[in-house]
Image (cartoon, grey):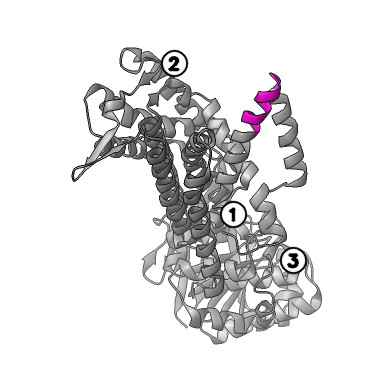
Amino acid sequence: MTEGSTARIYGLHIAVVAVLVALNFVLPEYHHAVLARVLVLAVFAMGYNLLFGYAGLLSLGHAMFFAAGLYGAGLPLYHLGWGIAAAFASGMAAGFVVSAVVGLLALRTTGVAFMIVTMMFAQVFYLVTLYFGEWTRGDEGLVLPQQARRIVFGGTALDLTDPTTRYLLAVSLFAAALFATLAVVRSRHGRVLVAIRENEERTRMLGYDTFANKLAAVVTSGVICAAAGAAYALLFGYVGATFASVQYSILPLLWVLLGGAATTLGPLIGTLFMYYAVDIASGYTSAYMLVVGVMLILLVLFFRRGVLGTVRERWARWLP
Amino acid sequence: MSAVLTVARLDCFYGEVQVLHGLDLELRKGEVLCLLGRNGAGKTTTLKAIMGLVRAQAGSIRLGERELTQLPAHEVPRAGVAYVPQGRRLFAELTVAENIEIGLMARGKGVSTREAVLDLFPVLRERLKQRSGTLSGGEQQMLAMARALCIEPEVLLLDEPTEGLMPSIIARIRETVGRLRGLGVSTILVEQRVDAVLPVADRVAFIENGRNRETVDVARLREDPALIRRYVGVG
């Protein structure tokens, strides 16, 4: 990697974050709220992309990691009265523990078996959230009280229900996840993950512990997804079992495929596109999923590697 | 000459089927040892067993004083054994430079190793930014060897490196193997083609039914071609 391309890469990523910050001052109220939600979900997709795009491990259980963060943050805040910072840390810790345990067990399998095993774990997690309905209120979910979603820094109160605060915190989380992902994929570990995706046995024959690298990828991915889940609970005040359902394991896969697997900015593009496609189409017809489906087919036909994947392939090989 | 790698009484199985039956082998410092034998004789399995890809049920494989059979597969390259499998198996989506970089990172090697490896395969210098999956067969073979050499191995295992290549490329690969001998790298070469072996090998081990029937100097083989006919069926 030359110094020139490094400068270009960091320049592009900083510019994207700067645009997102600037949008805070120009976006209408409705889009302000939508974009905050999209940014948090894009972080979820970024976590998924690390495992699927870079390491080549197709999981159908990532709703479990998002929900681990969601419940890990929401339950102690709701039931135990924890503060926001402690709840957020608790959500990430939950993601760490769940992903480490699932990774240790699921990585004994590969390919389709890995996909099925992760889906089974996620279903177990989903059923557990329903089983303990007394605490989680199952599908109905919990609405976190507004007064609990405030944090005080040296006399200054930060209200997470305030749209501007919420948006800027969503941008902050997105920026942190984006640069963390960029650091990972450009590190030695990130390059080994790509080698594993291309040919695991060959990578092992060069002297790399592929299991350890894959486990690290599952845990990093799980923690990023859990951070998104925890942020979702705290910023939008809702914790429900829907987020642990299989639908939320498939959505990040779609977002990543659309935006471009193994591209750092692809998850944002994919999430943004899907969210607005559903939003706009549903304004015109109740058969909005049909419209979205046609759009997806067209995208797959003309952007086989997703939007940014195609851009990288054709015009910008330097894109990470 | 001292032995770098010693395989003694090695038994290996694929499931219930025994493939290697008490195989013995000795690779000396700086030599090129060729394994010859018919299809299914156990040549590739021998290389895989050395790399830990097929577990030894009995016997030993020693690199110097270090026993390899107890190591996890990914530790074997770190101990100093590099393997270029049949079919090359590059990281096809990565560029030539990225393939080499992955090789260098494995044992923390730097620019000097990279340059030394590229000096061995100058054609790769012109292809550094090219996706490795788009290289010609000969270039892919050179890249596979280059990547393996990035870990600066003591022992190099080559499984049919000339398979499907043009004579001019075969000659270049043969020449490179000869140069590696000069650099002190000991090589085990698996080949089907006797004519590809004789110009470069120091000794030949005839593998038959998972056993090393006989190891002979190439000079003796030239004097007694009947040996080749007996074990390989050609010559």
Q: Quadrant of the C terminus of chain A?
A: bottom right
Instruction: Answer yes or no: is residue A180 visible.
Output: yes
Circle 1 is placed at which residue position? A199
**Amino acid type at mark 3:** Glu
Asked whether the residues under the numbered discs 3 and 2 touch, taking CB atoms below 8 Å apart as contact, a structural biologist would say no
Nearer the viewer's eye, disc 3 or disc 1?
Answer: 1
> Which label number is shown at residue B163?
3
Which of the pair B11/A308 is nearer the observer?
A308
Which of the pair B151/A241 is nearer the observer?
A241
In this rendering, do the residues under marks 3 and 1 share a single chain?
A: no
Q: CA distance from mark 2 to mark 1?
A: 41 Å
| Secondary structure that dominates the magenta span | helix
Give residue B52's position: percent from left, percent from top: 48, 56
Q: Chain of mark 1?
A: A
In the image, A155: left or right of B150? Answer: left
In the image, B35: left or right of A43? Answer: right
Image: magenta residue range: A277-287
* 10 Å crowding of disc 2: few (<14), some (14-19), many (20+): some
Dot placed on the residue nearer the N-terminal end, 2 or 1: 2
* 10 Å crowding of disc 3: few (<14), some (14-19), many (20+): some
- Under circle 3, the secondary element is loop
**Amino acid type at mark 1:** Asn
- Under circle 1, the secondary element is loop
Circle 2 is placed at which residue position? A139
